[in-house]
Image (cartoon, coloured by chain):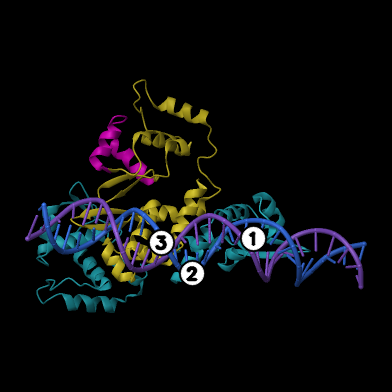
Chain colours: A cyan, B yellow, C purple, D blue
Amino acid sequence: MQLDKLVNFHKAVGDPTRIKIIILLKEGPLHGQAISHKLGLKPPTITHHISKLRDIGLVYQRREGNTIYFHLHKKMLEFSAKGILNLGEETMMEITEKEKLSIIKNFFDGDGRLTNIPSKRKKKIVILAYLVRNLSTGKNYTEKEINEYIKKYHEDFATIRREWIMHQFMFRQDNVYELNPKVMWPMVF
Amino acid sequence: MQLDKLVNFHKAVGDPTRIKIIILLKEGPLHGQAISHKLGLKPPTITHHISKLRDIGLVYQRREGNTIYFHLHKKMLEFSAKGILNLGEETMMEITEKEKLSIIKNFFDGDGRLTNIPSKRKKKIVILAYLVRNLSTGKNYTEKEINEYIKKYHEDFATIRREWIMHQFMFRQDNVYELNPKVMWPMVF
DNA sequence: TATCTAATTAGATGAACATCAAATTATAAG
DNA sequence: CTTATAATTTGATGTTCATCTAATTAGATA
């Protein structure tokens, strides 16, 4: 989803009157006069707001005689509302197995040690996930154990440990480290 | 649900600069100058936007020397983004004050300790909310503090702590616990 | 055609707000 | 104590926007 659409959606929903309209239409279609009366606002104001909601695809209308009924597009509301949650994570969905292998090959030497830590996000994620592959889910690790494990691949264990936490490959509580069960090698890639 | 909070959330997110900040912070914490440089905006502008994001609980900060790192509160983002979808189907809106008091009376003994944890969802929610009432919003708790707090009411702190997270009475990031500001005792009931 | 009703447009007003430069505060380091 | 760096506050400016009144359009019906 593009940034503009996301901004426009939130800008449109970021108004008390329009949220009230959404709440009303959630229970079923209404015509302008009804909305106007329920909210205590004049018809032109309702037209103004409805047109904003229509612009972002949240409202459509059906005419019956002189009266126009406004409907809420619930699926669109759900899709748009969740838009911001999926933003910025689509990068890892695009990557192919071939690219991953290429990245890994470039950053590991013949002895299987990491030559350096990638700075580009995409590559870093691939490397971090690859590094974690020999840890077990559901097991608790001490910080020392984690450090020893990392040192087999790279001397800067502190950075990698921190990156794991930051990118949620691992969780830490009370100095106990645990692998995020959601990030297992076959699933991330 | 509070209309104001919902409006404020969408109003805050309904700005291209703030969405960009959210996208940046999604990948990890950043300090003000870094954000300023990446977005091509002056520091006061960043302060302005960060404070708006902090007002709605989406950003918290940690100081390291002269530099302040801003973090995205991902759980809060998800919770807030989905807020508009749950409007009108309030889970606990049906319950009366009388019922709540009755449930509380049945599950607490004379010393104010919880006798056991309800299995029925409705009762469990009431108990979880009641238990949380002496924690403060906006304050960071360690896991140990949370455990000690719960132990005043019940020995199985692990279960209750997990239920709090599960039902979004609290948020956890790394090993820091924080009360969900939206669930305050007088508002839920 | 004339008339009625519902919705829209046009234009005005006042409030909210994004941005910046200048000045100020907070913390760390010399 | 003095200096340097990062963040914040203050105040100004131009823009966006919610709401209204008055006028206009669109469609239905007699």
To which residue does mark 3 refer? A85
Q: Residues within 10 Å of mark 3 (few under 14, many from 20)?
A: some
**Secondary structure at numbered mark 2:** helix
> Where, by quadrant of the figure, is residue A97 drawn?
bottom left
Q: Residues within 10 Å of mark 1 (few under 14, many from 20)?
A: many
Q: Amino acid at mark 1?
A: His
In the image, which residues are magenta? B141-166
Q: Which residue is mark 1?
A: A71
Q: Is residue B16 left or right of residue C4?
A: left
Mark 3 or mark 2, earlier in chain: 2
**Gap in Å between the C-alphas at discs 2 and 1?**
21 Å
Q: Secondary structure at mark 1?
A: strand
Q: Nearer the viewer, residue C27 or A137?
A: C27
Letter of the chain that mark 1 sits on in the rendering? A
Residues A153 and A24: in front is A24
To which residue does mark 2 refer? A5
Whole-number angstrom distance, CA of label 3 to CA of label 2: 14 Å
Please provide percent x and percent y for residue A113: 11, 71
